[in-house]
Image (cartoon, grey):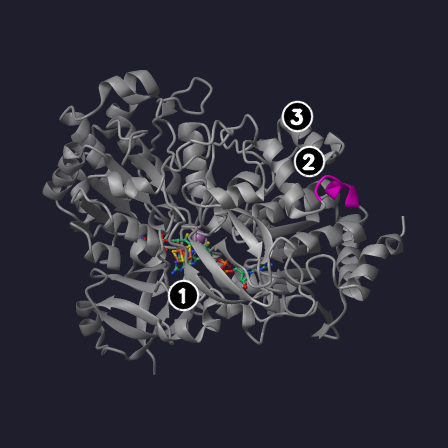
């Protein structure tokens, strides 16, 4: 079948009649001078932002006072969300590498080149020689469309997303412990707890509006922060436990030891709803506070105190983020927190829970519906019945769905390094900045026969290497749904026109399907809203059931809708949590206590590299690789222009380093220049680099949790040198 056939009507329409595929003005459903609520496109809090339009263009925004998530609040990124759209480096045309240089081309040429290159690679090297890496930052409809296109249409097998860098640990931990990837909480729980335990989470910076919800708690709660850094959150806490990096697992087992020893457990709950208590009690027997104190760097008395405060709490909630998820023993650490909630019966009641805070605004959508590592609705590629259900919903032959799991992100990168993977398509993520051991990745990407990148800017580190580049519309320029940290489906609306010939990712995927010759994959989903109908069908009967949602407008009217939502009735409460009945999603309905021996991280400090390097978020005004946030003049004023490294005053004195001095932070893999920020935010022997600056990930280590394959970004050996 010739390629030509599929370059037919769609492209011609595109080139000649820019009214289709989102190239036109705002959709009919919005008046040109409307004010309407759109969910924020940055973090997983999922705040509602009121967009004010004039003549069909978004001109201003304010925080929605009625949206149940943010109640009229927004963080600097939200307030400045429109600025990055207008940046002069927004990509407006596809690019194609010719004679070594990226040249602007029309969509037709770019799409033909992409399909020809990927088809040739598959023809010569088989379906396992191509892969895609996507994101938690596009609507669920687009993720679902992408996974369906690549795997059921183009015949690919391997794909993963930046959610591997972020939420894979929570996904696996919940799935193993609860039977489904199901964060149980609702944001109201921030206000209802009397003890909140934050582990490896810095919500003051990373989830500022969730932190505002904590500040609305009227119970005068105890806020306990477990973090090797004295973060902004730790400074505002009742107690800060500045543990040694990656000593969470022995600490949490030590706390469990005290709870078991004192009989401070909920026996009735355990007997009715949890498996594995006896084994867990035996496991933690050796983790006495005295024995774990040295490893954790805090005293036995502090461990006893922590356990005592958990026991005294009437509604205790446990919250974790990347300090837990990005670790060499991440899944077991997350499960150690889940275990604390289970053995004390702190789950299913207001103000309780073992609660993973999500990162990107739609990482939850990616976890459940992207057809990457699992099939839509939390289904399994290896299950013939599951494959049939997905195929039926899409109206395709089940044989087109691979009966094989994908490689994980790191295995895909390894495949690229070893030359087994020759074609890579990167969508809405910037791995060259965000993946660990960046120099190794750069070399691998340069080795590819075809690197295709799809982004709103052609200037990201990864996009600059692309052989084919597709310009994408972004937040507020397209429609779709997303799922926030508390399982609330929210709505993206098109309130702005994308610049030039940039297209919504959804329609880029549809065009590729046309050019490839597999447009039938989209037969039941010509638009995002039709894709939503397919996903609704696929959610029915699953824990993440949202089949009761009528349509996009319903989500809009309700201020977002949490799953599960089977349409029980209009008076269904606005805020819901899971497991109120003590029934979990495992086959026997009981949760599992899972645990393992403690292991050391791969690269401990050494005489040559005597410091432990931590990385993470720097300010509430910076987002990841800074492609978007750097485009706002307001946000740029809110964060340090130059890379900085936090180090302890005694370490600085020993090295003869003065405040603000330029230094070089070096690990076995690379070095980065940074200004010295000297103080007490990090303990002795530890340093911290914010991930937002160029080159930080040239330093980090390729070490992964064995269950989730999530990178351990927050631990490797480093040294600081004077920058001479
Ligand atoms: N402003 C802003 N907000 C964001 C983002 C952003 O880029 N900028 N990104 C979003 C995304 S995708 C995510 S995933 C979240 C991340 O949100 P967070 O996880 O809250 O942010 P991080 O700074 O990566 O890491 C949190 C803390 O983990 C600590 N930590 C490091 N090692 C350990 C350890 O061994 N044990 C413990 N207990 N703690 C440790 C670090 O010191 C850090 O303070 O933020 C989201 N929100
Ligand atoms: N050292 C260190 N590294 C880390 C972390 C850490 O804590 N420490 N954290 C990790 C975590 S948790 C995460 S989530 C990752 C994030 O890492 P990345 O995903 O690489 O970071 P972003 O800058 O968010 O990249 C998103 C890209 O999508 C583009 N984009 C935005 N909207 C759209 C859209 O609608 N369509 C398309 N096609 N493109 C769009 C943006 O311009 C940007 O280039 O970083 C990880 N890396
Ligand atoms: S807290 Fe998150 S969702 Fe809310 S405005 Fe800020 S970035 Fe957007
Ligand atoms: Mo993340």
Above or below, comparing residue 332 to residue 383 in the picture? below
Disc on the earlier residue, 1 or 2: 2
Q: Quadrant of the C terminus?
A: bottom left
Of callouts 1 and 3, which one flags the residue occurring earlier in the amino acid sequence? Answer: 3
Q: Is ligand 1 less than 8 Å from the beta carbon at label 1?
A: yes
Residue 163 percent location from the top left of the image: 49, 48
Residue 381 horizontal/vertical position (percent): 62, 32
Report the Cα–Cα distance between label 1 and label 2. 39 Å
Which residue extends farthest left? 301
Q: Position of residue 502 (x, y in %)?
A: 66, 65
Q: Residue at point 49% right, 32% down? A: 565
Callout 2: 10 Å neighbours few (<14), some, many (20+)? some
Residue 384, numbered label: 3
For the record, the magenta segment spans 518-525
Which picture quadrant has residue 690?
Answer: bottom left
- Quick one: label 2 or label 3, which is nearer the N terminus? 3
Residue 686 relative to residue 123: left or right? left
- The residue pinned by badge 1 equals 622
User: In the image, what residue occupies the spot 57% across and 58% down?
Assistant: 428
635, 397: nearer the viewer: 635
In this rendering, position of residue 158 left or right of residue 270: right
For disc 2, the marked residue is 402
**Tag on residue 653?**
none
């Amino acid at each position: 079948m010739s390629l030509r056939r599929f370059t037919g009507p769609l492209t011609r329409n595109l080139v000649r009649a820019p009214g289709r595929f989102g190239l036109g003005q705002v959709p009919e459903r919005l008046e040109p001078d409307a004010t309407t609520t759109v969910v924020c496109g940055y973090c997983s809090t999922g705040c509602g932002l009121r967009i004010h339009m004039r003549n069909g263009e978004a001109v201003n925004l304010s925080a929605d006072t009625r949206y149940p998530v943010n109640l009229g609040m927004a963080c600097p990124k939200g307030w400045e969300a429109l600025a990055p759209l207008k940046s002069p480096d927004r990509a407006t045309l596809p690019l194609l590498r010719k004679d070594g240089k990226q040249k602007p081309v029309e969509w037709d040429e770019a799409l033909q080149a992409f399909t020809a290159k990927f088809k040739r690679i598959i023809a010569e090297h088989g379906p396992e020689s191509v892969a895609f890496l996507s994101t938690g930052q596009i609507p669920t409809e687009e993720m679902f469309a992408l996974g369906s296109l690549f795997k059921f249409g183009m015949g690919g097998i391997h794909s993963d997303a930046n959610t591997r860098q972020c939420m894979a640990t929570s996904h696996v931990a919940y799935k193993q412990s609860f039977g489904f990837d199901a964060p149980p909480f609702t944001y109201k729980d921030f206000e209802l707890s009397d003890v909140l335990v934050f582990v490896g989470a810095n919500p003051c910076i990373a989830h500022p509006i969730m932190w505002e919800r904590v500040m609305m708690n009227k119970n005068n709660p105890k806020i306990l922060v477990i973090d090797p850094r004295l973060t902004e959150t730790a400074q505002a806490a009742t107690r800060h436990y500045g543990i040694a990096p990656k000593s969470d697992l022995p600490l949490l087992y030590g706390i469990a030891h005290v709870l078991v020893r004192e009989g401070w457990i909920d026996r009735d709950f355990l007997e009715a709803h949890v498996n594995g208590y006896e084994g867990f009690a035996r496991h933690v027997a050796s983790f006495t506070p005295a024995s774990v104190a040295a490893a954790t760097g805090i005293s036995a008395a502090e461990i006893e105190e922590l356990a005592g405060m958990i026991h005294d709490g009437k509604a205790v909630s446990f919250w974790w983020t990347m300090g837990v998820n990005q670790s060499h023993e991440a899944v077991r650490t997350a499960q150690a927190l889940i275990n604390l909630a289970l053995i004390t019966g702190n789950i299913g009641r207001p103000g309780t829970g073992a609660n993973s805070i999500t990162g990107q605004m739609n990482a939850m959508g990616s976890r459940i519906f992207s057809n990457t590592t699992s099939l839509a609705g939390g289904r399994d590629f290896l299950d013939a019945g599951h494959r049939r259900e997905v195929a039926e919903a899409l109206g395709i032959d089940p044989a087109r769905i691979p009966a094989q799991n994908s490689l994980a992100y790191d295995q895909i990168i390894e495949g690229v390094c070893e030359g087994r993977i020759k074609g890579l398509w990167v969508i809405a993520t910037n791995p060259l900045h965000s993946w660990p051991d960046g120099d190794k990745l750069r070399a691998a990407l340069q080795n590819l026969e075809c690197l295709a990148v799809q982004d709103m800017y052609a200037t990201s580190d990864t996009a600059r290497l692309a052989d084919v580049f597709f310009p994408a519309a972004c937040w507020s320029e397209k429609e779709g749904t997303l799922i926030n940290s508390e399982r609330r489906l929210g709505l993206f609306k098109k309130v702005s026109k994308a610049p030039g010939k940039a297209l919504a990712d959804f329609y880029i995927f549809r065009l590729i399907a046309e050019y490839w010759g597999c447009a039938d994959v989209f037969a039941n989903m010509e638009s995002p809203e039709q894709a939503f109908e397919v996903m609704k069908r696929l959610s029915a009967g699953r824990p993440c059931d949202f089949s009761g949602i009528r349509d996009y407008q319903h989500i809009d009217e309700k201020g977002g809708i949490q799953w599960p939502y089977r349409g029980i009735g209009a008076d269904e409460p606005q805020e819901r949590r899971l497991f109120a009945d003590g029934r979990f999603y495992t086959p026997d309905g009981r949760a599992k206590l899972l645990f393992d021996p403690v292991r050391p991280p791969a690269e401990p400090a050494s005489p040559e590299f005597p410091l432990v390097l931590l990385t993470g978020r720097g300010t509430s005004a910076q987002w990841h690789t800074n492609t978007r946030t750097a485009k706002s003049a307001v946000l740029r004023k809110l964060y340090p222009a130059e890379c900085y490294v936090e180090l302890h005053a005694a370490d600085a004195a020993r090295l003869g380093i003065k405040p603000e001095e330029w230094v070089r932070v070096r690990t076995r893999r690379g070095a980065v220049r940074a200004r010295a920020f000297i103080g007490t935010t990090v303990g002795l022997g530890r340093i911290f680099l914010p991930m937002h600056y160029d080159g930080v990930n040239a330093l980090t280590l390729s070490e992964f949790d064995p269950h989730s394959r999530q990178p351990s970004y927050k631990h490797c050996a480093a040294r600081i040198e004077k920058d001479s």
